[in-house]
Image (spheres, rainbow, N blue to C red):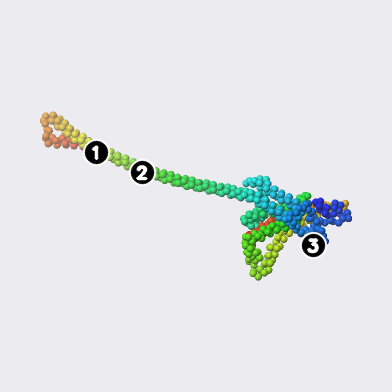
């Protein structure tokens, strides 16, 4: 439970039976004041805790993989083993899974997404950091935007403008009469909604997970009071907080995997007409 | 629950009434968006340029090494198999040749022995024939000489006994011949 949560939710003196209602954490735990700001052109950059954490994550990822792959050996040792595990997971489990051998070209792209998102999610349960970077909506939106701006031009480049949209809006093997209904649906689902669902899926999972953990940790603090029910409730809430944290570890990896796999699937669809 | 509380905050805030100070959690500030994009591009740029090509190369090299090793082993095995086959063929050929040579030698030996035997037989026959001819000649000669000598001695003796020369007398010669014929018959018996 971070200090922000405690302070944001009613202060240290707020407990059960102290005449203080349960200070349920809300959207405010996802708001961070700018630590400092600077201006480039007309755009003001507010550097908050989240953006600083994101920079740290970037540095950690780059640092680790540069170190792990600094002089790769045929017979791997130590950090190279771990790095290779990650590389092979992305290559075989995501890129080749979605695109076959052709996916090898996109491994660095997918690899960067997977580890950036995974670590950004993981920050949510790191003591003192304790905010999943991806629960700040702008971050998943940024990632989904990059993916969107990759697969759409790629599809147009590889298939040609006409065929790309024709294959998407008028998939073969459908009765002609259905196209009137299908084409708008396909257009909305692929071109309009897809980047939104792609980002919201990641954001909402991390947002909800963090809110749950915050709620139970606030509850376990709030329920500490001179009553049996309070103590029992506090202990139970704390146990649930621990369990949810464990569950979050799973969700963090899973969401990173899903985001990256969907990226691979979108790229795969752009490379070839969908069947 | 709390999630609903948060969502209600979201909805009120995104409602844009301006009643609350709190910005929506669904707000997308441009600066955070830009920072997010830059964060990805930095990771992608650095790892894609510096770290991942190296590991890709290493993994390919490893695959090649392993596949190369397997291929080399297969080649070596094929080579060994070829050598073994060749060796077996040669061995079989050698055996065949040896047996052929043995058979040939057997035949040759028989032939040689047979030839030698027939040559020896011919030579022996020749020698025998020559010896017989010589013996016959010698005997004839000896017989002639003996006949003459014995005749002369007998005539000489008879002449001395009867005191007269009977050299040219045909009756004497006939008597001598009869006598000698008798002698020969006795000897042959």
Residue drawn at 18 percent across, 37 percent down: B181
Distance, label 1 to label 2, CA atoms, is 32 Å
For disc 1, the chain is B
B74 left or right, relative to B54: left
Instruction: State the residue position of label 3.
Output: B16
Residue drawn at 78 percent across, 53 percent down: A34
Residue extending furthest toward the front: A41
Label 3 secondary element: loop
Q: Quadrant of residue B180?
A: top left
For disc 3, the chain is B
Report whether mark 3 lies on the same chain as mark 2: yes
Residue extending furthest toward the bottom: A177
**Numbered tag placed on residue B111 in the rendering:** 2
Instruction: State the residue position of label 1.
Output: B133
Q: Is residue A234 visible?
A: no
Q: Are marks 3 and 2 in contact (CB under 8 Å)?
A: no
Label 1 secondary element: helix
**Quadrant where the N terminus of chain B lies?**
bottom right
**Closer to the observer: label 3 or label 2?**
3
């Amino acid at each position: 439970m971070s200090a922000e949560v405690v302070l944001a939710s009613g202060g240290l003196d707020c407990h059960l039976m102290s005449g203080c209602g349960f200070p349920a954490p809300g959207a405010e735990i996802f708001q961070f004041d700018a630590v400092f700001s600077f201006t480039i052109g007309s755009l003001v950059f507010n550097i908050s805790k989240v953006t600083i954490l994101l920079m740290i994550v970037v540095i950690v990822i780059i640092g680790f993989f540069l170190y792990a792959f600094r002089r790769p050996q045929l017979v791997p040792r130590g950090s190279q083993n771990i790095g290779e595990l990650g590389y092979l997971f992305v290559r075989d489990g995501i890129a080749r899974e979605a695109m076959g051998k052709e996916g090898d070209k996109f491994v660095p792209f997918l690899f960067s997404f997977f580890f950036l998102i995974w670590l950004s999610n993981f920050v949510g349960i790191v003591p003192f950091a304790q905010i999943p970077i991806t629960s700040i909506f702008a971050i998943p939106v940024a990632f989904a935007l990059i993916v969107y701006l990759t697969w759409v031009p790629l599809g147009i480049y590889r298939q040609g403008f006409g065929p790309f949209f024709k294959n998407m809006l008028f998939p073969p093997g459908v009765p002609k009469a259905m196209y009137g209904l299908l084409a708008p649906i396909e257009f909305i689902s692929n071109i309009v909604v897809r980047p939104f669902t792609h980002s919201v899926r990641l954001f909402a999972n991390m947002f909800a997970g963090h809110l749950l953990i915050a709620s139970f940790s606030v509850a376990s603090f709030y329920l500490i009071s001179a009553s049996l029910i309070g103590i029992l409730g506090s202990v139970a809430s704390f146990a649930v907080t621990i369990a949810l944290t464990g569950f979050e570890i799973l969700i963090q990896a899973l969401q990173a995997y899903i985001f990256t796999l969907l990226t691979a699937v979108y790229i795969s669809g752009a490379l070839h007409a969908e069947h | 629950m709390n999630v609903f509380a948060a969502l209600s905050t979201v909805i009120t805030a995104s409602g844009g009434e301006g009643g609350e100070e709190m910005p929506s959690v669904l707000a997308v500030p441009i600066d955070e968006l830009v920072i997010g994009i830059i964060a990805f591009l930095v990771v992608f740029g650095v790892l894609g340029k510096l770290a991942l090509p190296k590991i890709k190369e290493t993994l390919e090299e490893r695959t090649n090494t392993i596949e190369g090793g397997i291929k080399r082993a297969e080649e070596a095995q094929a080579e060994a198999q070829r050598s073994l086959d060749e060796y077996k063929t040669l061995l079989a050929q050698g055996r065949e040749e040896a047996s052929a040579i043995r058979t040939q030698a057997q035949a040759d030996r028989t032939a040689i022995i047979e030839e030698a035997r027939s040559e020896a037989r011919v030579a022996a026959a020749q020698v025998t024939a020559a010896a017989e001819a010589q013996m016959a000649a010698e005997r004839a000669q000896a017989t002639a000489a003996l006949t003459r000598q014995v005749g002369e001695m007998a005539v000489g003796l008879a002449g001395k006994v009867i005191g007269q020369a009977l050299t040219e007398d045909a009756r004497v010669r006939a008597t001598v011949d009869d006598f000698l014929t008798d002698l020969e018959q006795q000897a042959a018996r």
